[in-house]
Image (cartoon, rainbow, N blue to C red):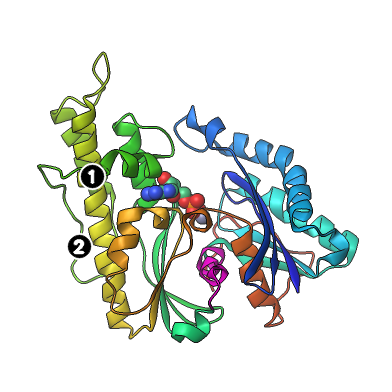
Amino acid sequence: MLILGIESSCDETAAAVVEDGRRVLSDVISSQVAIHARYGGVVPEVASRQHLLQIVPVLEGALAEAEVTLDDIDAIAVTHGPGLMGSLMVGVNTAKSIAYARGLPLIGVHHLEGHTYAAWLGGGDPAVDPGFPLIVLIASGAHTDLIVMRGHGDYEVVGRTRDDAAGEAFDKAGRILGLSYPGGPAVQHAATGVSPSFKLPRAWLGDSLDFSFSGLKTAVLHKAQALGVYPAPDGGAPPTLVAEIAAAFQSSVVEVIATKAIAAVERYGAKGLVLGGGVSANGPLREACRQAPVPVIIPAPKLCTDNGSMIGAAGYYRFTRGLTHSMALDATPGLALG
Ligand code: KG4
Ligand code: ZN
């Protein structure tokens, strides 16, 4: 079965053809990063206009790369939330148009369910090996969630951020340090091989599985001001100090996320730990989570950030359970998981 997966919830216009929920035949992404970089973050109106410009070429690219046509596609899966309203609408309306014109089943997918099912694109079947229940850690630009997944489509969110998402914190730290946008990869790069001479705080929140990163963000700002890194002096901030703050920030985020993810595995008797979302592309976080006492499934970095394949995969597992949507499917920016 071939599913065309479409993702447009934030700043990537993406489409992919996925066979039987596990095999990626094509994966095309048009990133708007360069456009939003000059504003230091995603500008919603600009994002939706870009999606409109890119969606048709991206879809054509995905079909061509998979060497198929719409005649070969069995169903259309699309992210219908959460995300930016204008961005989501482009994907949803495109998917509805194709489904209506071609008489194809339409499957709305929750964006975080998509990130979760990226774990199924690695060759194995996590539902069988290691099997449910799984703890899923989704760390992205908008979410930091710990989810108990007891079966396909069966989720309980047991930890979430109380303020900023981990990716948002990386992006803000990157901006304070004068690094390129998005901050995540730039902070990781700056921190590589650096052992900072100071520590930044960790928000443990008792034995809760929730997260908080806003205090850390403020600590980065204060440290940057104290060391003369922010505002950047004439001639730029000293790279060694930038690197030290980046490393101290990253080690705080990584230690808290990995510790809580492993605690969730133990608390819920999970058979495995799955990582997803853009921040799971972070090298030290991947390494720290591998210390869990169960198999750890982490998609390739390219599949951690937003893509169409993960939507095609999640769509397949909804479709095989008979879960499709009517033409009333709508973009839902605050969509809840479940
Ligand atoms: O999942 P994603 O592509 O989009 C959302 O759904 O939000 O995640 C984007 C986030 C950004 O905040 C970006 O800075 C972060 O993922 N990110 C990283 C890395 N690569 C991307 N954060 C830390 N380390 C990375 N290597
Ligand atoms: Zn995402």
Residue 285: quadrant of the picture = bottom left
Q: Pick the quarter of the image with the N terminus.
A: bottom right
Percent across and percent down for residue 93 are 76, 53
What residue is at 66 percent from the left and 37 percent from the top? Answer: 50
Cβ atoms at labels 1 and 2 below 8 Å apart? no
For residue 240, say whether it is visible: yes
Label 2, secondary structure: give it.
Answer: loop
Which one is closest to the eye, mark 1 or mark 2?
1
154 left or right of 328 in image: left
Packing grade of label 2 (10 A; few <14, some 14-19, many >=20) is some
Residue 210 in sight: no
**182 vs 315: above or below:** above
Task: Name the residue: 73% across, 37% down.
Answer: 53
Residue at the far top in the pictured view: 234
Stretch of the chain drawn in magenta: 113-124
Amino acid carrying label 2: it is Trp
- In this view, the residue in front, 332 or 99, is 99
- Mark 1 crowdedness (10 Å alpha carbons): few <14, some 14-19, many ≥20: few
Amino acid type indicated by mark 1: Gly
Whether 42 is among the magenta residues is: no
* Whether residue 205 is situated above or below residue 272 in the rendered picture: above
Q: Quadrant of the C terminus?
A: bottom right
Q: Is residue 323 left or right of residue 138?
A: right
Q: Please provide percent x and percent y for residue 179.
A: 35, 32
Magenta segment main secondary structure: helix
Query: In this figure, which residue is indicated by the disc labeled 2?
Result: 204
Determine the CA span between mark 1 and mark 2: 26 Å
Residue 193 is tagged as 1
Image coordinates of residue 111 in percent, x first then y, are: 56, 61
